[in-house]
Image (cartoon, rainbow, N blue to C red):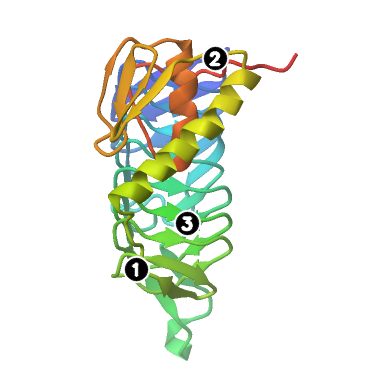
Amino acid sequence: MEIFENKEKKIRIVAKSINIGNKVSFGNNISISVKGEFCIGDFSRLGNNVLIRGNNVRFGKHLFHSQGLQIGGGGRQHPDANFEIGDRCTIHNNFINICEPVIIGNDVGLSQDVAIITHGYWLSVLEGYPASFAGVTIGDGVIIGYRTVILMGVNIEKNCVIGANSTVTKSLLKTGIYVGSPVKFIKEISGLNLPQKIQKTEEIIENYMKIARYHDLKPEIEISYPKVRIDDFVVNFETMEYSGQETNVTDDFRDYIRKWGIRIYTERSFESNFKFD
């Protein structure tokens, strides 16, 4: 078994194989023990208070975790106790049971207090009581709202939006917005036309300039949709491609526009330009 340890930060990772990418950062109080592989991709962050148990656990690139995470739970000693999450995902103080596999795609967000459960049982099945053991799959681009529970065997189609305090008991096979306990389909997601996209971009930039002034920044911004130039840095609001010189100003801009779902990832971490004493 391989061991990665930082006693000062109370970090201990034990696995048959440990693969930590470039520019990965760790918080404090992290305990990871898996039988197989532990992998975390480039530019990722695991925050404070993490407890992970299972077989194989794999995090993709550009993961952002705030604090408080438990992966494992009942059945964590099973051979199928595997967890995998793709690139550019955000997670928080989530509980993820991996009695059966949990597979999460790219660009997925798990809001605070989201739970994923892969088994349910209690009294004897020989007396007619239920028992269920099944994995969970979440497609690319899905956002799971605050305090939502996802139950055994659920498959969520890509780009779905799940509202807060929902319970997902069955697979969601159509992209759209779902809310409730159990969730119900609310509406489809319709794209904007070009004039609407330009208008929305102008609104985003106008709102950002208020934030920039609050942060004592004076960026020069020019819109040539879908491209937006901020000083010497250019981003494409549709393809998420970028070019040019990055600075603390462009970091601040990227940090703001991701709140509108325009998620630009570079090799630079987001840094706050305004700190309270």
Q: Within 10 Å of the Cα at label 3, are there few (<14), some (14-19), or many (20+) other Cα atoms?
A: some
Q: Which residue is mark 1?
A: 153
Task: Return the disc, 2 or 1, that comes first in the chain's sequence.
Answer: 2
Residue furthest toward the bottom? 128
Q: Which residue is mark 2?
A: 7
Of the 4 image quadrants, the one containing the N terminus is top left
Q: Which residue is mark 3?
A: 74
Q: Which mark is residue 165?
A: none
How many angstroms separate mark 2 from mark 3 (CA)? 28 Å
**Image check: 25 left or right of 2?**
right
Of the 4 image quadrants, the one containing the C terminus is top right
Q: Within 10 Å of the Cα at label 1, are there few (<14), some (14-19), or many (20+) other Cα atoms?
A: many
Q: Nearer the viewer, residue 140 or 6?
A: 140
Q: Is residue 175 above or below residue 91?
A: below
**Image check: 20 left or right of 269?**
left
Q: Position of residue 253 (x, y in %)?
A: 46, 24
Q: Amino acid at mark 2?
A: Lys
Residue furthest toward the front? 195
Task: Return the disc, 1 or 3, that comes first in the chain's sequence.
Answer: 3
Q: Amino acid at mark 1?
A: Gly
